[in-house]
Image (spheres, grey):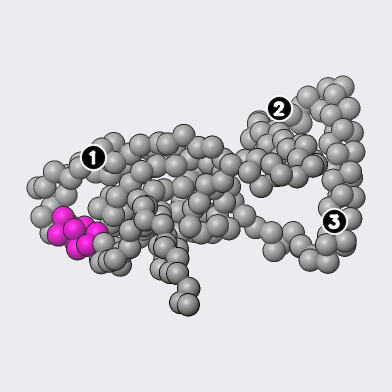
Amino acid sequence: MNKIKNFQDWLNENAQIGKTSIDNPGGFIYSPVAEEENESNYMFFSNLRRVKELSDMILSMDKSKIDSLLNSGHDWANDHISSAKTGIEHVFGFFNDELKTPVTESAHDTVDLHRQFDMSPTWWAAWRMENEKEKGLKIQKDSFSKTYEVKDKDDKVLFVFDYKRNKIFTNEMPDYFTLKDEVSSEEMQKIDSKANDIKDDLAGVDPDKKEETKPEEE
């Protein structure tokens, strides 16, 4: 049996300054206020983000206990949420009409990925061999952005592996990315082969080097 490097040797959660959205397949991180810092109405966007964050936190709470509280003389909370929903619907309708670029609820399907880990092609090859078939995962490669998008059987995005920068973007906890400690020689050969395929795909790509602009010919 071969001793495979434990996932803890690769795993390194980095501090996030913002969120990484799945609609940006390269997994680029942006500052939570960068897109509004030059706007005179930056508080509008800040308040809107806060409404979303609070809504997500409430939805993560025990719904049966919330239901019980609402039925125990706290229906005022229901009224507040109803009023907020009506107000936001009015604002959405106004912008949707004025901007002439209608957005439907079904078309706006993004997932914010809050956690970031450093990983390697070897880890990816080993983890994929262990989990893809067993968990019925759906894995899609984007050669342009150098990423793999991993979904479960219900099409929920689990994580994005950016193999150009050896990073994972996810909402999953670290334990989700564990590997078994030992593999057979045959398995190790397959892992190394698949990892090398990724390295071959990156031939000539320097993730730390910015693209240089060629001077115009006179």
Foreground of the two, 61 or 160: 160
Which residue: 43% across, 69% down?
A: 214
3D distance between C-alphas at marks 1 and 2: 41 Å
Instruction: Say which quarter of the image contains residue 160.
Output: bottom left
Q: Which mark is residue 191?
A: none
**Magenta stretch bounds:** 187-196
The residue beneath circle 1 is 6
Q: Secondary structure at mark 3?
A: helix
Whether pointer 1 and pointer 3 mark residues with C-beta atoms closer than 8 Å, the reply is no
Q: Amino acid at mark 2?
A: Lys
Q: Residue furthest bottom?
A: 218
Task: Please identify, in this view, whether the residue under mark 3 or under mark 2 is nearer the observer.
Answer: 3
Residue 162: image location, x then y, percent = 40, 55
3D distance between C-alphas at marks 3 and 2: 36 Å
The residue beneath circle 2 is 65
Which residue: 36% across, 43% down?
A: 118
Q: Secondary structure at mark 1?
A: loop
